[in-house]
Image: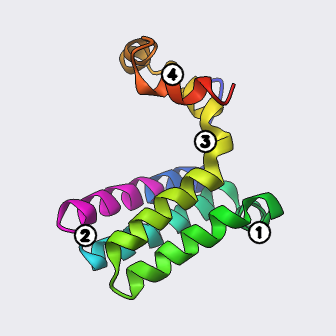
Amino acid sequence: MAYEMSELKKIGLGLIGFGIFFTFLGALLFFDRGLLALGNIFWLSGVAILLGWQSTWKIFTNRANYKGSVCFLLGLFFIFVRWPVVGIIFEIYGCIALFGGFWPSVKVFLYQIPVFGWIIQYPIMLLDRLTRGSA
């Protein structure tokens, strides 16, 4: 295999997957505060385990990422104080601001998935339009 993942990285990816699942389920069930909070905890711990604690700390405290970090943490706060819709809006903006530089890498990874990659390579797809502006 060209790239093998350690067990810790697999756990991190699993936690990120659970976090996305619980966040989606919480939004689907009329912004259930408990599921959204659980999804955020899973997602944040998964990112920390996947990237490493120091790299995660550097991403969130980097001077260029302050706006994204503050928005994400403010969204987390709003979810905990029972304003889930406002919290989700802040978190989405914070994630886009924090991880916007990763779109080209994500695009290359998605293009390599056998059937899905062939479908999203059509210029009609939104993914191509999203990454065309950043390239």
Q: In the rendered image, is residue 38 in sight?
A: no
Residue at which label 3 appears: 5
Mark 3 / mark 1, whichever is N-terminal: 3
Give how far across and how far down residue 71 sits, in percent: 58, 69
Q: Which residues are magenta?
A: 16-30
Residue closest to the eye, 88 or 47: 88
Residue at which label 4 appears: 128
Q: In the rendered image, is residue 40 in sight?
A: yes
Give how far across and how far down residue 133 sits, in percent: 63, 27
Residue 78 versus residue 127 in the image, above or below: below
Determine whether, in the image, residue 29 is placed left or right of residue 82.
Answer: left
Tell me the SS state at disc 3: loop
3D distance between C-alphas at marks 2 and 4: 30 Å
Name the kind of residue labelled 2 in the image. Answer: Phe
Q: Quick check: marks 1 and 2 in contact, CB under 8 Å?
A: no
Using a 10 Å C-alpha cutoff, classify the residue at mark 3 as few (fewer than 14 neighbours), some (14 to 19) or many (20 or more). few
Using a 10 Å C-alpha cutoff, classify the residue at mark 1 as few (fewer than 14 neighbours), some (14 to 19) or many (20 or more). some
Residue at which label 2 appears: 31
